[in-house]
Structure formats: structure tokens, C-alpha cells
Amino acid sequence: MAENPVRNLNMLLVEEQPLLRRTVALTARTLGLGTIHEAASMEAAERLLREHSFDGAVISIDCGALRGCVYNLALLDRMRNGMYVSDSDIPIAVMAENATTGLLNDLRERHISRVILKPFRAKVLLDAFASFQQPVAR
Amino acid sequence: MLKSAYVHFKRPMPMLAAPIPDNDADRLAALRELLILDTPPEERFDKVARFAAEEFDMPIALLSLVDENRQWFKANVGMNVCETARDTSFCAHAILQPDIFVIPDARADARFADNPIVTGEPHVVFYAGAPLTLPSGFTIGTLCLIDHKPRSLDATELAILATLRDLLLEELSQRTEAANG
């Protein structure tokens, strides 16, 4: 049986913690999952999204120290509205500290393929990136 | 009769003390050139050990450096000592391996079953050690994971452990540059 060829995907990881980000990006390269571009903030992610086309993304939506902000869905909205170079329907997994029904509804409306909750583990993020290799039913 | 019954019992194979590599003097020289032994903890190493313990859900994660007669821990999660004897050390075995050294269950492995760190504190059952090999080719220690129950690591987990090891090597190489000033 012929093996399915593995596509060299261009993917985006938006995550504040440098060690987690670095570990995932380097391990993905070792495992041949593709190239993961790293962004430490939404602003850095926007810059990358304006310049590169991505096949999938894992995005932390936690606001960090920002007062009064629980989740930041603005980047997801702009991606889904086709404001960047990538297709507007690329698979996106989201990292969140915890999930409420309201948040899950918001994410469902934005066609998020997976929600990853704390504790964030490199292995779980790599599984999410690996799943982008599969064709997504839309 | 007790006497004849006794001769039929096989004595368990004794613990295999960690072998000393032929190049140990040069290896030790490379380790000591780093000027890292017996130095205080450093966040850049501690954070990798903490990350490894959390990522793999292990009670113990160590940056272990194999000195002449001891292994000394530069970063230490879960051990209440800063060093142990080299001859009982799993890491002293791991530094002789070309790749990550995994012992799924030390109690079922004749090389380690009666090792005092298996039969007593800290009760090592699972061990995985990624050798820290410097650009010079000398392996000075390991990033290792220890659990008190049998475990295994899949291909992704082994790759993550190798990445964390590589990140430690990057930090150690900065130390080499500083030492060579």
C-alpha cells in the first residue's frame, strides 16, 4: 500500500511562553510535521499573517496581564474574515486557560477545530499540528 | 534437604556498576572546563528541568553531570540531594549511549534490579536519559526523567525530550564560550 505523502505545511503558533513555543517548533521540525512560525503576541502574529500564507494555526487566546480582558478573539475574527494572506478557512486550534459554555459557542461560530485547555503540553500542541495534515471536512 | 535445595536457587545477577569510558579523563576535562560543577542553581537550566517534569508528568527531572565519582545535579526537580554516587547512577550508563537511554522498569532489568537507588530511595523504576554531548564529542551528563512506576515514551515524547536536551546544550555552549572568554 502506498503511503500518503506528508505535506510540508507552513503553520503558525501564537503563544507567550518561549520554552513551550520553542520546544514545539523544534520538535515539529524533527518529526517532519512542517515549519512552525512562532509568534509571542497577537501583534507579532498579525505581522506574520500579513506576510505568509499558513496551512493551520494554534493560537493562545488568553489576554495575559491585560486588565478586564478574558479572551481575545479579534485575531480569529480577522483570520476568518480573510484579512490576511492565508485562506480564511484554514484549521485553527485554540489554547485557553479554561472553557465556558459562552466561549465554546464563540469558538464554534468561528469554526475552531480544537480547544486545548491548561496545562498546555508540547505533545498536545504537536498532536494539533499533526492533525492539520489530515484533510479537514468543511 | 535445605543444603541441596539451596544449590538449585540461582543467585540474581548483581547490579551492573556504571562502566567507565576509555576517554573518561578527557571527558572529565571537558566537563570541568565548563566551570559549572558545584555552582548555584540557574533559572535558565531550572526552567528546562521544570518544563520536562511537567510535560512528561514525572516526579523527578534532572540536569545531571557525571563527575569522576559522583553525578551532580545542576538542575533538580524532585530529588532532595544534590549528588549521588557514580557507580549506582543510571546517567553514568546513559552517557555511554549514542541516543536516549530508556529503562521502562528497572525492577525487571537485571542490570538495575538490585541497584540501591531502585531498591531504596529514590526508588527509580522508570528512567529516560538524553545524553548531553558537547560539540567536542564528549558526553558530560544527561537530561533525565525518573518515575516510581513503569512507563514508556512514544516517538513524539522521545523527540520532545531530545529537543529539551538540545536547548540545554545551547545554554551550555554559551557557558563554554564565556569560559573561553
Image: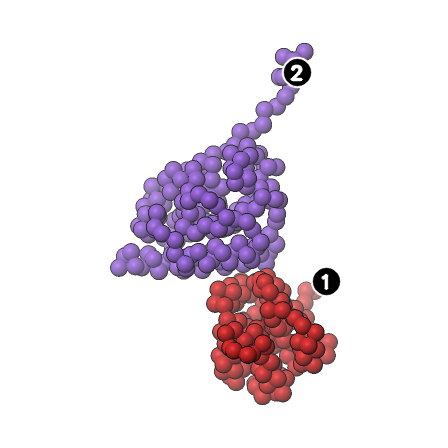
Name the front one of labels 1 and 2: 2
Q: Quarter of the image containing the C terminus of chain B?
A: bottom left
Q: Quarter of the image containing the N terminus of chain B?
A: top right
| Above or below, comparing residue A105 to residue A98 in the picture | below
Q: Position of residue A113 (x, y in %)?
A: 68, 74
- Element carrying mark 1: loop
The amino acid type of the residue labelled 2 equals Ala
**Which chain is indicated by disc 2?**
B
| Above or below, comparing residue B99 to residue A21 in the picture | above
At 57% from the left edge and 82% from the top edge, which residue is drawn?
A75
Whether residue A11 is visible here, answered yes or no, is no
- Contact flag, marks 1 and 2 (Cβ < 8 Å): no
| Above or below, comparing residue A5 to residue B162 in the picture | below
Query: Residue tagged by mark 1?
Result: A1
Q: Position of residue A115 (x, y in %)?
A: 65, 70
In this view, the residue farthest toward the front is A68
- Give whichever of B154, A68 is nearer the camera: A68
Query: Residue tagged by mark 2?
Result: B5
Whether residue B178 is visible here, answered yes or no, is yes
Q: Which chain is purple?
A: B
The CA distance from mark 1 to mark 2 is: 58 Å
